[in-house]
Amino acid sequence: MRSPLVGRAHHLAVLRDVVKRAVDFQAPQLVTLVGNRGTGKSRLVAELARELAPPVRVHHGRARADEPGSALTAVLRDR
């Protein structure tokens, strides 16, 4: 059993707006979630992805400190 998502309604609404814009304009959107470990970034993406249906797709990944040469780490550092 999963506990309810608490205190993230605004953040979830922002992500839903991004998805709506992607669908309305038929253009991919990029969102970067930044925060300390354990703050619920992955949970937030999971909650959003669970309520979406095709043709919407959510691609997610993570940059790890112990993988300094990863492509995702380089993209996030440049951003």
Image (tube, rainbow, N blue to C red):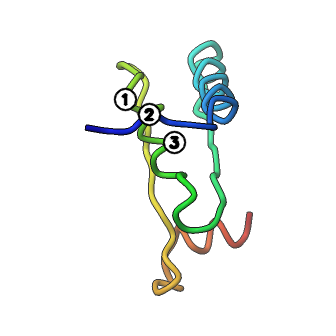
Residue located beneath label 2 in the image: 4
Q: Identify the residue at the far right of this view.
A: 79
Earlier in the chain: of badge 1 and badge 3, it is 3
Residue 78: image x %, image y %?
73, 70
Q: Residue at x 48, y 63 (%)?
A: 62
Residue 39: image x %, image y %?
57, 58
Q: Identify the residue at the far left of this view.
A: 1
Q: Nearer the viewer, residue 71 or 8?
A: 8
Secondary structure of the residue carrying tag 1 is: helix
For the residues labelled 3 and 2, the Cα–Cα distance comes to 11 Å
Residue 71: image x %, image y %?
51, 71
Q: Quadrant of residue 54?
A: top left
Secondary structure of the residue carrying tag 2 is: loop
Q: Residue at x 54, y 52 (%)?
A: 41
Q: Mark 1: which amino acid?
A: Arg
Earlier in the chain: of badge 2 and badge 1, it is 2
Residue located beneath label 3 in the image: 44
Residue located beneath label 1 in the image: 50
